[in-house]
Image (cartoon, grey):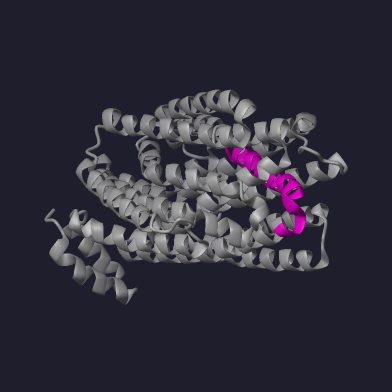
Amino acid sequence: MSNQFGAKAVLRSVLLTTGSTYVTYAAGLVTSMLIARGLGPADYGRYAYLVWLSGLLVLVMNHGLTTSAIRFVSESLGRKSLVDAQDVHRRLQRWQGWSLLAVGAIFLAALPALRPAGWEGHLALFAAVALLASFAKAWYLFSISVAKGYGRFGIEASSISLLSLINLAGAGIMALLGAPLDGYMLLFLAISIAHPLMAAHQLRRAEIRKGSREIDDELLARVKPHLAWTMVSTLVAAFSNKAIETYLLNRLVGAEAVGFFTIAATLARGGVDLLSSGLMTVLMPVLANAYGAGGQQRIHRLGGDAVRYFHFLGLLLTGVGYFWARPVVELTYGSSYAPAIFALQMMVLVRGVTLSYAAFGALLTITDNQRLRAAEAVFAVVTSAGMALWLVPTHGLEGAIYAHMASTLAVFLFTFGCVWWVLRMPLPLGELMRMSAAALSAAALCFGALSLSEAPTLLHQLLAGLLYVVLYLLSTLIFRVWNQNDVVLLDQIGQRVPALRRLALLLVPWARPT
């Protein structure tokens, strides 16, 4: 199955994943809009809290299992050992079963402290939906992680696209019927359960199955420490990725603030996914396969390119997201959700600037530096907790926003330092600085154009976002951001997307020699 990691296969996977992300994000945005308008800020905040808590439980249930599955299944295939890949699948799936039971028991014990703000229904319904949805999503994410290790990225792409459309149809019916909060909760549960059922069918069709023997002792000796350190870093990171801010908002401020914060976080994450989902999906399997086939020297080149591309996409997100925040929130959710505008602007700024963190994290994981990932995670949760406990009680929603920004920047700098000083990896700092200069120049011109109007309308801000895209792309040419390798890559992708081949020809005079 190693041909799944060839250049053409990887490009096909990137395009497939990106296309499915567009479908999923568009459907998810409309679904969220329908639910928010149907429930109102208070009940939508409680619904958003349920979805957030379920997602947190999924992270805790799977801890490092998904990352280790991608890493060692893909690496085994890079060594041409299908048997080892199947044995890794078998052992990790067994450990996942015990994890699901343990986390479920802890959740039920802590249930009184996890009640949504202003919850008036029976707590058993909330617990059942949160727990069953978490079990289903955890099983699904582990399954598609194994599939990614095999290079079968289409399994995730097709399942989430179809189910997001079904979820949209369900939410539309609920909105027409004027369904209460309980109805939307049950819809969320039904869609969650459908995920693993569809994945199981697709895994059988792809002939991806677990092995029938115990994992080799030598391989197990590598899997265990990797999983242990990944588990530590994942668990700690799970409680630092807006978790503390969300919990404090629910306990101290109210359900409405949870809704505003969640809307901003969801839209910011959606922007990231739209721009970079293809790269994010294939990054770790491709690096792991390259590491298994050629060692650390081979992934240095791939890692450097990944950092550049993520930074380029992040700066694109930063400008467009900032200018479009008000139109997106007001046109989709309505003026009653206006407090989410500032939260969204700040979140896209920090997420865009730090988007290359995904590449740094993958490099540390692939090179068996899980202790550094664990140290990074501990640093993240300490920073996040400290900032949230300091700012949320006194500043409410704004405090949660600033706490999230500060902790995200701090963790990014910590991880950058690990890659730079510990891995001794040559990072393309010159190219990154050129991209940043191009983005700042484009943003300055857009702010200047927007200032010509005393009271910018939604249309003005939409046009400013489009202008930023054009100016940013032109600025990357003026600052000579691209090189000859980028032209070759565009030409390869152009075999499937002819417009990109024409773009590659236009880029040739502006590309620097490698």
Task: Give the extent of the magenta segment.
Answer: 37-63
Say whether residue 95 is left or right of residue 174: left
In this view, the residue in front, 214 or 302, is 302
112 vs 161: above or below: above
In this view, the residue in front, 430 or 469, is 469
Please tell me whether the stretch drawn in magenta is mainly helix, strand or loop.
Answer: helix
Q: State the residue at coordinates (67%, 46%).
A: 259
- Is any part of residue 3 visible from this angle? no
Q: Count the marks: how many?
A: 0
Q: State the residue at coordinates (59%, 62%).
A: 331
- Is any part of residue 498 visible from this angle? yes
Say whether residue 425 is left or right of residue 264: left
Residue 307 image point, x, y percent: 31, 46
Name the quadrant containing residue 401: top right
375 vs 504: above or below: above
Question: Looking at the rendering, in which quadrant would you find the N terminus?
Answer: bottom left
Residue 318 image point, x, y percent: 41, 50
Say whether residue 189 is left or right of residue 245: right
- Residue 53 is inside the magenta segment: yes
| Most distant residue in the front direction | 454
Residue 385 image point, x, y percent: 56, 26
Say whether residue 364 is left or right of residue 232: left
Q: State the residue at coordinates (21%, 64%).
A: 488
| Most distant residue in the left direction | 513
Residue 128 image point, x, y percent: 80, 44
496 vs 339: above or below: below
| Most distant residue in the bottom direction | 498
- Residue 458 is inside the magenta segment: no
Name the quadrant containing residue 472: bottom left
